[in-house]
Image: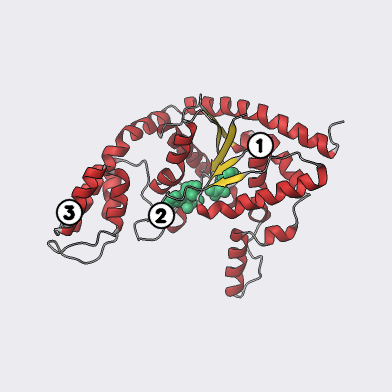
Amino acid sequence: MKNRILTGIKPTGYAHIGNYLGAIKPAIELSNNEDFDCFYFIADYHALTTLSNRQEMIEYTYNIACTWLACGLDPNKVIFYKQSDIPEDFELNWILCNVTPKGLMNRAHAYKAFTERNEKEGLDKDNGVNMGLYNYPILMASDIILFGANYVPVGLDQKQHIEIARDIVNYFNNKYGNVFILPKEYIQEDTCTLVGLDGRKMSKSYGNTIQLFSTEDQLRKTINKIVTDSKMPGEPKNLDCTINKIYKLFATTEQSKDFDKKLLNGLSWGEAKKELFEVMNEYIKPMREKFNYYQNHKEEVDKILAEGAEKARKVAKEYLQKTRHAIGADL
Ligand code: ADP
Ligand code: TRP
């Protein structure tokens, strides 16, 4: 049997170039390899820990769906769906809750960070924590286990969640026999953590992103916001700067070498930003056209997601049936 690859992205904002280079592009490359069966989905129920607005949920869900399609996801090669279309996921989630020790959730990074912040501010430890945030890792384990995934491509920040999923598989299998497959994280060591406008990790939560698909004009304006040092035109620039780091990810080797030379020779920051815009825009343009096409043909996106959900549910039902059998709920 082929190895099964599964990953999800939460629709909590507009996709940015960090999401593209760190998650979407490598996942699409994997889907072009015949040795793998790929399941990629939009984790809309996970986004509920951040979003509580219907319009935002709809807008971001389409944004992420159109982004995957524009970046080259082929629905004939990948089972592509929306988490909320798979009711089996939430049934399995309940079963998994009953083999998961509460202490394991207490140690999850996102929950721990939240409670530590509360304690520092003199508030009740669980102030503002709802059960969605607390149980987040169990739903993620369910997403993975329901399809018998072998590998889960994620960024480093998600490593603990995959470890928790493995723990949950072991708890279940120890009680009920060898029912679930043990998943493994797939972290590309060479995938950089892309820096944002302010030099910190690019992230929706820092508000320092460069949106992957905006208009040319917006892209130019965002690039102009990249923070630089105060070196004057004519002064050599440090090659380790944000502009150069981003430039390298979109340019050919030749262009990169040339840009290094120009920076060392004192290219002004204004000119450097113009060149960065040119090289990024050139790269993104064909994808942007596809993105705009899908945004204007949402009925096609709906159809792709509905067909994906149908295919995904076939597999999900099989795994859920095995689970029901194991626990004695299949009379
Ligand atoms: P954000 O931090 O913007 O909310 P998410 O947590 O939704 O991003 O991440 C979705 C995917 O994109 C994950 O696989 C994550 O590892 C990847 N990713 C996010 N930010 C970056 C970045 N700056 N560089 C590389 N990959 C990133
Ligand atoms: N928690 C992941 C993130 O924040 C998104 C996600 C939800 C996911 N379910 C998943 C990733 C299952 C991989 C597998 O990025």
Q: Amino acid at mark 1?
A: Gly
Of 26 and 330, the residue lying toward us:
26
Q: Residues within 10 Å of mark 3 (few under 14, many from 20)?
A: some
Residue extending farthest to the left is 234
Q: Residue at x 54, y 29 (%)?
A: 305
> Residue 232 placed where, x, y %?
16, 64
Q: Nearer the viewer, mark 3 or mark 2?
A: 3
Kindly report the distance in space between the C-alpha atoms of the residues bearing marks 3 and 2: 26 Å
Mark 1 vs ligand 2: CB below 8 Å: no
Q: Residue at x 63, y 59 (%)?
A: 108
Which secondary structure lies at badge 1? loop
Kindly report the distance in space between the C-alpha atoms of the residues bearing marks 3 and 1: 50 Å
> Residue 216 placed where, x, y %?
28, 41
Q: Amino acid at mark 2?
A: Met
Question: Is residue 44 visible in the rendered structure shown here?
Answer: no
- Badge 3 or badge 1: first in the primary sequence: 1
Q: Where does label 2 land, which residue?
A: 202
Q: 196 above or below 217? A: below
Q: Nearer the viewer, mark 1 or mark 2?
A: 1
Q: In this rendering, would 197 be left or right of 299?
A: left
Q: Colour scheme used in the picture?
A: secondary structure
Of 33 and 24, the residue lying toward us:
33
Q: Where does label 3 land, which residue?
A: 261
Q: Amino acid at mark 3?
A: Lys
Q: Where does label 1 land, which residue?
A: 148
- Badge 3 or badge 2: first in the primary sequence: 2
> Residue 40 placed where, x, y %?
54, 36
Which secondary structure lies at badge 3? helix
Mark 2 vs ligand 1: CB below 8 Å: yes
Of 236 and 139, the residue lying toward us:
236
Mark 3 vs ligand 1: CB below 8 Å: no
